[in-house]
Image (cartoon, coloured by chain):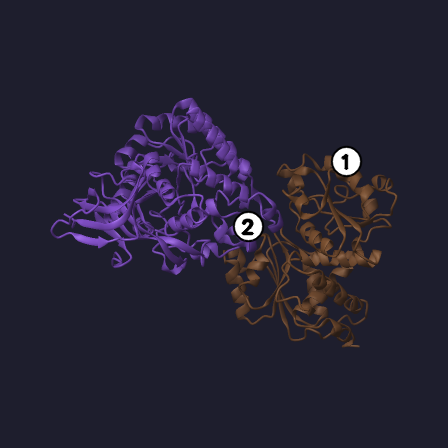
Chain colours: A purple, B brown
Amino acid sequence: MSQPILLQGGRIVDPSRDMDQAGDVLIQDGKIAGVGRGLTAPDGALVRNVTGKVIAPGLIDLHVHLREPGNEDEETVASGARAAAAGGFTAICAMPNTDPVTDNQAAVGFIVRQSGRAGLARVHPIGAVSIGQKGERLAEFGEMVGAGAVAVSDDGKPIVSSHLMRTALEYARTFGIPVADHCEDPTLAAGGVMHEGLVATRLGLKGIPAAAEEIMVARDVLLAELTGGHVHLCHISARGSVAIIREAKERGVRVTAEATPHHLVLTDVACEEYDTHAKMNPPLRETMDVEALQGALKEGVIDCIASDHAPHAYDEKEAAFDDAPFGIVGLETAFAVAQTDLVGSGLFTLPELIRRMTTEPARVFHLPGGTLAPGTVADIVVLDPAAKWTVDPATFHSKSRNTPFTGRALTGRALLTIVAGAIVHDVESPPTAQA
Amino acid sequence: MSLGKDLTGLEHMTAGQIRLILDTAEPFKAVSERPIKKVPALRGKTIVNLFFEASTRTRVSFEFAEKRLSADTVNVAATGSSVSKGETLVDTARNLEAMRIDMVVIRHPSSGAAEFLGNRIASNVINAGDGKHEHPTQALLDLLTIRDKHGKIEGLKVCLVGDVLHSRVARSNLWGLTKLGAEVAVCGPWTLMPRGIEELGVRVFGRIEEAIEWADVLNVLRLQLERMEKGFIPSLREYYRVFGVTPERLERSPRAITIMHPGPMNRGVEIDSRVADGPHSVILDQVTNGVAVRMAVLYLLAGGRAELADAAKGGSE
């Protein structure tokens, strides 16, 4: 039985109950035992004064790539869960594009076991939509859900066949899980390495037009409407996609969507000088897209922020732009990047941002957490919204360092991360590294 | 004024730097016209020509330029070298540098490869063509050829015709010409025009007839045959019929239009043989100027001063 914890004197932000007030949070037996003023610590409790800090539900990330099994030099379930905890995340959802692909109950069970062994942030597996992510035959959703999968996705690749997408949406409905799609028309995107626009023209790099995403967003929305299934649209990057999603939500289509911190703050200008740390798929787009994404997140047309944490070995990014892999790490910078730009600009209040990283992602994938309601699981983060720091990838807990934010001055970070009532990250006394 | 360590492209160069290269090339032209085509300007310097893509003209032109400046040169082709065994670009470069070289001339299929290399090794790097990005020495020799023919560049109307989308020659020409005050246009099918090209300060002609009516100079780009296979144009036959630069079309111009081509030409596709071999073609002058321009670039990057180029020229006489 873990030691009771009393967090004293913080600003309690719980978007699930529209709460933003000063007070204490008591954690006992892995659950939230009390929220209020002047709570008394039970015998033997750890008491932490968090005056001036924010107590919030633990952050939840619906979209990360851990590289286990297959590329454990880049990330493991344990190292990813540690990076997550350091970033204030109490739960992350692992995409199935591992090697071999997480497309059956045994593979899903492996992720669950590795997560349990690590004992850090929760790692919820996402199963593949198709066997081997080949886009041909449906994987066994029922057994994967039984083993712990919370959603299905072929992320990394789009679901090209509209028929497969249709059947996936219908079949996933049986189990109450969403189908998360990486929206990209491969015939339009083929060979592209960055956003198709003026910067790509100047750099002589092949572009990926926004329409490559928008076409698939439109298709997925239509298929969700046809089937009554729940489609979750990964890492939306283009303003045209936002318009399609907004219109679909107004019609009552079961569609949810996420945006990454980098798509919310960076544009294709970051690719100048062939910086491979600005190479990701979908690509960074233009200022008008960034503004549309920020507005959509504020309104709830885009439901939540997800990092699309994509670790790569340093030497893979040490290549010509065409030859470098897509993707960047994000777990340890996500909150601070979002807070610095979205709250710092005045567009979002801090509780509005926290909602998009806690309550909303929990709702989208039906996950535990995302609330501080008494009696629920004690997945909690204590944030210091005023902490100023500069991104130094050498300090990352992730095994990979591929970030475009190196050297960027950020505000806000996680001080204390608690999963099921146990401290998994504490800047005041960092836990010793796991073997 | 100096060029800095590397020559990776014209986009970030000043008009002054470009003029410096063109002016420095003038005295080097004479070297190639003499019985003994050699000056000692780069004696003792070691230069590697690192070609990850097939090239005859550019590689030979660089090699002549290097040899006529008395440098020691080595050619490395991607096929048959460690490159084809999976060695990375940065490892290839570091290994060459470990042999204490002074300069690398690189051609690579990836845009940005020259800049990538230049940022990682101490030797001077010269871009001999990177992907679809830039081919600066080609544009410099084009500029020199235009200046020779017309006596100036400023105010001239130059149209780049053909596959602008995939052309590094087009991008370098666009930067060089606009910096030196020329008016620039591009002409070709919309499938071969890059997004946002109008925003770079160029005029776009959809029809070759319009371009011919407007231009003083046509720089006809090579149409790579694979463009048809990849579906950018339906057939070479139609391309010639719609966009081919033919004597019949040129006759409608009130001016004698100077005809350029970076080579190698597809006769009867983008350019009619009668035009390529005609009185207004300066295509072979471009090739001749290529050696002088490359001598100038090598000389300046190695630290040579423009005012000494004349003296260097006279060195072995």
Q: How many numbered marks have been drawn onto this rendered protein structure?
A: 2
Asked if one can make out residue A187 in the rendered structure from this viewpoint, the answer is no
Looking at the picture, does residue A374 appear above or below residue A163?
below
Q: Nearer the viewer, mark 1 or mark 2?
A: 2
Indicate the amino acid at tag 2. Val
Chain of residue at mark 1: B
Q: Is residue B24 left or right of residue A204?
A: right
Indicate the amino acid at tag 1. Arg
Judging by the rendered image, the residue that carries numbered circle 2 is A269
Q: Is residue B274 left or right of residue A74?
A: right
Q: Is residue A1 left or right of residue B223?
A: left
Q: Residue at x 74, y 46 (%)?
A: B185
Residue B312, image x, y percentages: 75, 74
Quadrant where the C terminus of chain B sits is bottom right
**Which corner quadrant of the image does residue A148 belong to?**
top left
Residue B262, image x, y percentages: 73, 52
Q: Under tag 1, what secondary structure?
A: helix
